[in-house]
Amino acid sequence: MNKPSIYGLTLDQLGAWLEDHGHKKSRALQVWDGLYRQRVTEFGAVSEVKPEVAALLEEHFAIQTLAVHTKQESADGTVKFLFKLEDGNLIETVLMRHKFGLSVCVTTQVGCNIGCSFCASGLLKKSRDLTSGEITEQIMKVQLFLDEAGQGDLVSHIVVMGIGEPFDNFTHLISFLRTVMDAKGLAIGPRHITVSTSGLADKIQEFADLNLRVNLAVSLHAPNNELRTRIMKINRGIPIEKLMEAIDYYLDKTNQRITLEYILLREVNDQREHALELSELIGDRRSYVNVNLIPYNPVDEHSQYQRSDQEAVLAFYDMLKKQNVSVSIRLEHGTDIDAACGQLRSKQIKRMEKTPS
């Protein structure tokens, strides 16, 4: 039986575990420093930790449960990692370089059951959730890659927008967030982390109650039920009215701004009337909402969709501006290596599925 990832424990959980096994709770901080500051890959390499503690941890936990299967680098500096899990499943993680720092887009599930009709990630149905340790280890693998480059670069931002629906893996997601935000570990501030959801209303409310101060983005992609149901099957069970109620709850509870993600599909949801309808839907929430317009990225299996031309994108943008809606256009990263928004579903994974065992 595979040993669980040590990254799956928060600092408090690690302290409690050590105490239960006859050691001082304070030893957890030494181990934590070794994992996240020294970035060791073996327990015996953690400085100041007694050999018997290192041996105990080695017996019960693993530091490395992900292996780099392949790595692709884009012309714009984006790096896409294809990681192999211990059970043989493959997931993708993306490192993006920005003027403000380095961000990592993490995956939370093996496959996705949301089934948005424009997205590559849902082409592989969900087979399981990732553990919090497997999610955290994606960050650590990318950081080790940066360490090896010798530039002193650190991961500064996290976006939970990879394969899977994060709120469908809620418990492990929250554990992951608490771990990476811990001031004694990676110390990535909540305002540097964004979680994206396709609109699980009850989980949006539960997330609001936790008040983690992490940024929230909601994949909307259409201003009315008829259109949203056509391109996002989740809307059948959670229509826009219910989603907006959850968003209102979040805004009232946290007093934080929220991002509405909107992929522009040519002659599907990118017309003037769609922009006007979207502004009406936002209504008096304007001061708390930003619309992020996302250029559609090509996916072979979704040939019914095409990218909106630049003129249509700018017209949509201008119409929202005229309606006093805060709006931005997402900067693309890694399109040439299928690492951009909506493209995460490695062609290598697809090929491997087709290859007889």
Image (tube, rainbow, N blue to C red):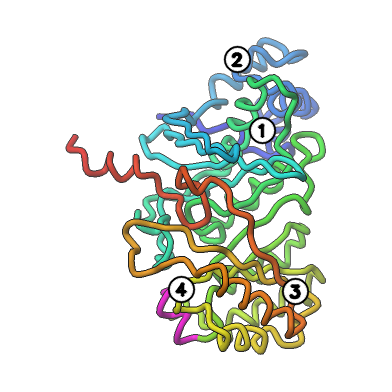
Which residue lies under the disc numbered 2? 55
- Label 2 is placed on what type of residue? Ala
Whether residue 63 is visible here, answered yes or no, is: yes
Looking at the image, residue 91 sits to the left or right of residue 201; the answer is: left
User: Magenta segment range?
Assistant: 225-233
- Label 3 is placed on what type of residue? Ser
Tag in front: 3 or 4 = 4
Residue 3 point in image, percent of width and height:
48, 29
Point 55% across, 37% down: residue = 79
Which residue is situated farthest in the front direction here?
311
Q: Quadrant of the N terminus?
A: top left
Q: Is residue 304 above or below residue 222?
A: above
Residue 349 point in image, percent of width and height:
34, 42
Q: Secondary structure at mark 4?
A: loop
Which residue lies under the disc numbered 1? 17
Decide: few, some or many residues near mark 4? Use Cα within 10 Å; few <14, some 14-19, many ≥20: some
Badge 3 or badge 4: first in the primary sequence = 4
Looking at the image, residue 207 sits to the left or right of residue 112; the answer is: right
Q: Which mark is residue 326?
A: 3
